[in-house]
Image (cartoon, rainbow, N blue to C red):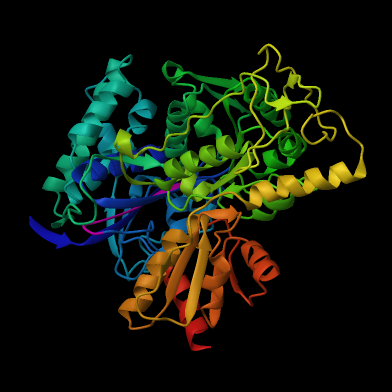
């Protein structure tokens, strides 16, 4: 059969939430990563644990963009859709460009299944798909036939149809197969019959592609040899990168890691992953609620651990009082917010970046907190290290704002060498630090480092270093309870000065053409913004780009950067929260471009909006 070379492909697997689409996509991604392509993924699944089978709310999908060059997003529109039932087809066909390939499981296109999603007639026969390259495949029947020699019921055999589909797509795009077979042997090691059946279905899908006349062409996407610096790489999701970053930070700080957490989508993966690493001195505590989780973490910080609590937006709301307590106590604490659609319970499995103002101001009183935001799944590793650096050096809680798009998405990540990692070690207080007028030596828990304004970190039980903790205002230096107005004013201003004085890197601006328009982003908008900027520059449009990692405090040079452009555009997956902060602080007429539909921006969509801004 003919082999056609492509520079990139976007594939979307879609089916019922019980069809194993996330597993199928994850395995295809793993083999693509091992092959050496650059890649970006977008898992998309329903919030319901098990939505009604065959319905539109129950559709689960996994999109993968892979290429022989550097890419930044999961892609705007799939070139290939694998639809396991009518609901999957109807929910996704609108995203396909004309000419895209559609592989459908014809066994599921029954009259009842069609009626369930509002099809009056089968789209496979009514001509509505004539603009696409349609491949009708009886996936269920072929899978059952391939497994007829196994001692399985028909229902058990049908469950392997996702592996048949994976085998077929692996043949179409020349993906390696050894890793998937190794994975299946490991996953079903205690169920040898199921293991053998899944491997047989996977091989049958591959062989079907090789022998059927319906697939006359296969495709090759060469490794992205020039896209990556030399190093050892692995595919990594944002939550996994964050977990590894937290473990690395604890080792670099020579402190035990403590996670106090309550399960919440999409942050739970971090709890699950960290619980596997007791060998690195990690302790995980699954609390009875969000408040208990952060309370335990703050207690661990008082006891000398690198303390972390993980949550999403609704959990941050519940944790706000304890975050304020951590501000008052001036203890290092990492608050990891994997943002999702809100308000309230909102959209648990969809992405949004609408917690920025909550992170900035969502506490009573003047309670400033540093904010760090990763920009890609792999960048979550470095963002965790940076958040830990700030928390430990300045004795403050730090908010780390990731989101569902980063948390569940994945990309290649270069494993850093040990000598590239920062030294995060801190010195605990061990003795008296202040001399009274009478010459006696005492310990003052709020006597500050003159450079960082951080107070000493004294481990409970250290003789002579006993001191009060609690939420009532402390006296400067002594840490005694104080209701003095002047002291409160001084402590409030000192805590703010400590945050304002945090050393962060200057903002880097990418502006090769001397543009007059700057697009400024933060968090997960980095990929779509950068892809849109590349499109505009290829079309000859000058545009500058800058992306914020530090949202509190802002980089020192941000005001100067903003004043250097006639127009500043800020795309956000909210209604303009960063733009509000920028306008208030720098008096710059920043233009917002906003989206809050639970999905990341598309590069083409952003490119059009930025072109309009340039021309306006």
Along the line of sight, which residue is nearer the eye, 397 or 169? Answer: 397
Q: At 52% from the left edge and 29% from the top edge, which residue is drawn?
A: 426
* For residue 351, side relative to residue 69 (left or right): right
Along the line of sight, which residue is nearer the eye, 95 or 331? Answer: 331
Q: At 25% from the left edge and 33% from the top edge, which residue is drawn?
A: 180
Q: How many circles with numbers are drawn on the protein?
A: 0
Image: magenta residue range: 60-69
Q: Residue furthest front?
A: 438
Along the line of sight, which residue is nearer the eye, 285 or 55? Answer: 285
Q: Position of residue 182 (x, y in %)?
A: 23, 27
Q: At 89% from the left edge and 45% from the top edge, which residue is drawn?
A: 486
* For residue 244, side relative to residue 571 (left or right): left
Work out whether 306 lies above or below 30: above
Work out whether 269 lies above or below 574: above
Q: Position of residue 254 (x, y in %)?
A: 46, 24
Along the line of sight, which residue is nearer the eye, 13 or 335? Answer: 335
Location of residue 245 by image quarter: top left
Q: Position of residue 165 (x, y in %)?
A: 28, 43
Q: Is residue 63 magenta?
A: yes
Work out whether 426 lies above or below 612: above
Magenta residues: mostly which secondary structure?
Answer: strand
Location of residue 332 by image quarter: top right
């Amino acid at each position: 059969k003919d082999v056609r070379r492509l520079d990139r492909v976007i594939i979307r697997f879609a089916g019922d939430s019980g069809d194993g689409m996330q597993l199928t996509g994850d395995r295809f991604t793993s083999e693509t990563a091992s092959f050496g392509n650059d890649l970006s993924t977008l898992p998309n699944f329903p919030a319901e644990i098990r939505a009604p089978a065959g319905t539109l709310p129950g559709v689960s999908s996994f999109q993968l963009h892979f290429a022989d060059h550097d890419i930044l997003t999961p892609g705007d529109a799939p070139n290939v859709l694998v639809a396991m039932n009518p609901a999957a087809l109807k929910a996704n066909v609108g995203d396909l460009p004309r000419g895209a390939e559609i592989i459908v499981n014809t066994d599921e296109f029954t009259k009842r299944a069609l009626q369930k999603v509002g099809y009056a007639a089968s789209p496979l026969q009514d001509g509505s798909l004539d603009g696409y390259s349609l491949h009708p495949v009886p996936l269920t029947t072929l899978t059952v036939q391939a497994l007829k020699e196994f001692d399985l019921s028909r229902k058990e055999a049908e469950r392997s149809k996702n592996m048949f589909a994976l085998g077929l797509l692996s043949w179409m795009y020349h993906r390696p197969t050894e890793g998937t077979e190794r994975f299946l042997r490991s996953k079903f090691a205690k169920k040898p019959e199921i293991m053998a059946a899944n491997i047989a279905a996977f091989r049958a899908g591959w062989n079907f592609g090789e022998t059927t006349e319906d697939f006359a062409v296969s495709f090759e996407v060469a490794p992205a040899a020039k896209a990556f610096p030399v190093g050892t790489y692995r595919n990594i999701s944002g939550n996994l990168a964050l977990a590894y970053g937290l473990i690395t930070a604890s080792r670099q700080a020579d402190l035990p890691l403590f996670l106090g957490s309550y399960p919440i989508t999409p942050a739970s993966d971090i709890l699950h992953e960290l619980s596997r690493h007791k060998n690195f001195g990690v302790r995980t505590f699954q609390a009875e609620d969000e408040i208990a989780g952060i309370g335990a973490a703050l207690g661990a910080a008082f006891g000398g651990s690198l303390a972390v609590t993980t949550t999403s937006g609704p959990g941050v709301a519940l944790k706000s009082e304890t975050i304020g307590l951590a501000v008052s106590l001036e203890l290092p604490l990492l608050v990891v917010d994997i943002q999702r659609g809100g308000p309230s319970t909102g959209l648990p499995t969809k992405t949004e970046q609408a917690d920025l103002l909550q992170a900035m101001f969502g506490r009573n009183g003047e309670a400033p907190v540093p904010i760090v935001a990763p920009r890609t799944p792999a960048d979550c590793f470095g963002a965790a290290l940076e958040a830990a650096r700030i928390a430990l050096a300045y004795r403050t809680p730090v908010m780390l704002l990731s989101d569902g798009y980063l948390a569940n998405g994945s990309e290649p990540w270069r494993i850093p060498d040990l000598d590239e990692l920062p030294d995060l070690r801190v010195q605990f207080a061990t003795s008296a630090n202040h001399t009274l007028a009478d010459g006696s030596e005492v310990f003052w828990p709020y006597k500050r480092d003159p450079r960082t304004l951080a107070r000493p970190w004294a481990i409970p039980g250290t003789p002579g270093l006993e001191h009060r903790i609690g939420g009532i205002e402390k006296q400067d230096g002594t840490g005694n309870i104080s209701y003095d107005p002047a002291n409160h004013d001084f402590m409030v201003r000192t805590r703010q000065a400590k945050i304002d004085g945090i050393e962060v890197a200057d903002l880097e601006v990418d502006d090769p053409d001397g543009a007059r328009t700057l697009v400024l982003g933060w968090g997960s908008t980095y990929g779509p913004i950068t892809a849109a900027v590349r499109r505009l520059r290829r079309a000859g449009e000058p545009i500058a780009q800058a992306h914020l990692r530090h949202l509190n405090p802002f980089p020192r040079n941000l005001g100067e950067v903003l004043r250097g452009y006639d127009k500043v555009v800020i795309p956000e997956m909210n209604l303009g929260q960063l733009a509000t902060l920028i306008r208030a602080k720098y008096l710059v007429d920043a233009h917002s471009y906003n989206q809050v539909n639970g999905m990341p921006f598309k590069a083409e969509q952003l490119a059009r909006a930025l072109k309009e801004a340039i021309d306006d």
